[in-house]
Amino acid sequence: MSFLSQNIPSKRNKPDNSKLEESDINEPIVVKENASEDDGELSDLDVSRTKKRKNGKEKGLKEEEEQEMKKLENFLFGSLYSPVEFGKEERGEVEDKAPDDSALFFVDRSAGSMLSVYEEDGELPLNVEEGRGKQRKPVWVDEEEEKASINIAKVNRLRKLRKEEDESTVTGSEYVSRLRAQHVKLNPGTDWARRDSALKGDGYYSDESSEEEREGPVVVDSILRTDEDLVVKSSVKLLPGLLEYSRLVDANAEDPSSGPINSVQFHRNAQLLLAAGLDRKLRFFQIDGKRNTKIQSIFLDDCPIRKASFLPDGSQVIVSGRRKFFYSFDLVKAKVDKIGPLVGREEKSLEVFEISPDSSTIAFVGNEGYILLVSSKTKELIGTLKMNGTVRALAFADNGQQLLSSGGDGQVYHWDLRTRTCIHKGVDEGCINGTSLCTSVDGGYFASGSDSGVVNVYNRHEFLGGSRKPIKAIENLTTMVDFMKFNNDAQILAICSGMKKNGMKLIHIPSFTAFSNWPMPNQSLGYPRCLDFSPGGGFMAFGNAAGKVLLYKLHHYHCA
């Protein structure tokens, strides 16, 4: 009895934080009276056991403090601040905590009972623990959907749901699925918040996973597990007929021009826009479609601006007018340099020029059929080209290796700038005086405008091969064509005539037809003088004679 009584702790000496491990409680305490022979060995055992008990008490206190902090956080902020960690708690501890935590939160399982009729909504498993990989079955299906037919070509706002141009009617279920797809397209979700149950083997482990599997390398990114193309080009083509667009705040709303706008161009980053005109000011705007904040303006006292253009590399702006000289504005150094007159030339005007896509050469229109080639680095004359007639328009192709020109003789010249020789000369069908030229970004098409308002579109490779017939002669304008521009993917060609109000048309290149809703009958564009598309095709800006730069959003293109 004396041995048992000595091992029972008294209530008065019982410590407050008395959560001891079972191993400590069940261990018998050795009485000092029975320890007579092996005092050295027992003393070592006592010291080690005392240390264990102290470590156990400290560990228990830390765990209790952590639990109290978690309970307090749950009580104040909810369960969001205490994420569930699977496989880290023992079964006994979970059972002990269940009665205390049940009052703090509950699991709402009512959302799991709401099942969608459509198969797309049934991708998540019905029961995560039992039925992983199984899809939900529709509880109820409307049989009238298959019988119903809807005409999506009749209503304007439903035409975007067509997959083919001649498609008109679809079934009810197909109509609903296309509406859902259009909604997902316009309202993309947050991919980081989705956890697909099918990715069990791609970085997610179940509760039954072993510790070795959890500690191994986890490859979440599927890029390392496939040989598919990382960049997939969109196969969606722009449909003819109606163009989806919306009017935005004018690009120069913060600082309108007091004279006609002669040049509008987007920077390669699609956020910076320059606007210049006869008021001698070069303005820069940051384009966002809402405020279009003005960044800077530069006043050139002795040069009413006829044309201003970025170098394709985005480092400088070339500005010219009806003067013997031109200006170069360095965007990095914010420095304006006056260049000219050119050595050995007597041109009184350098107002028409084009810059090569590789930013190496600037081609100016000179007198008596001469084309002046100037280096963009040294700003010095490096060569000349000579046409039979007068020069009116220029355009580069093949990344700056070839140059197209047209003018008073009604012919289109192709020049090889590496040898500076004419490699081809062909008659522009029906043209007497060529007034404008432009090429597509890939160089496959080029368009030639004349003073009669007719625009001929050619396949450039076929034209070089000897074909004289244009693919299409566009006769939507009746006055002189002043300006033309292909968009980034050559599906739209904009043609302008500044001699007639609303003298601007947008041509759908695959079908070579004009968009019927541009411009609208009640829409006033003024007298357009210049135009540009953003690098991604999402924005279109053009300047008019009233000093405004009108900005539009083209909904077919998702990038600016």
Image (cartoon, helix red, strand yellow):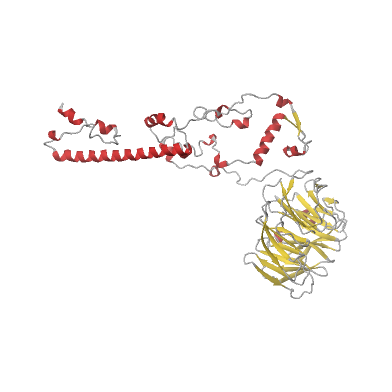
Tell me which corner region of the image, top left, top right, bottom left or bottom right, holds residue 7. Answer: top left
Residue 122: tell me if it is visible.
yes
Of 473 and 537, the residue lying toward us: 537
Horizontally, residue 213 falls left or right of residue 299, namely left
Q: Position of residue 168 (x, y in %)?
A: 77, 34
Residue 442 location, quadrant: bottom right
Tell me if I can see residue 395 in this picture. Answer: no
Q: Pinpoint residue 274: horizontal percent, then vertical percent.
A: 70, 60
Q: Residue at x 72, y 48 (%)?
A: 554
Res. 18 image quadrant: top left
Give the residue at the far left of this rendering: 37
Q: Can you say which quadrant of the picture contains the N terminus? A: top left
Pick the residue in front: 135 or 396: 135
Q: Position of residue 258 (x, y in %)?
A: 76, 62
Q: Residue at x 48, y 30 (%)?
A: 106
Q: Residue at x 60, y 40 (%)?
A: 189
Left or right of 385, for residue 69: left
Task: Point out residue 221 in the picture as x, y percentages from the top left corner.
Answer: 53, 43
Total labels: the figure holds 0
Q: Is residue 19 above or below residue 336?
A: above
Residue occupying image coordinates x 71% and y 27% = 145
Q: Is residue 476 left or right of residue 381?
A: right
| Residue furthest out toward the front | 12
Q: Nearer the viewer, residue 78 or 412?
A: 78
Q: Is residue 178 above or below residue 414?
A: above
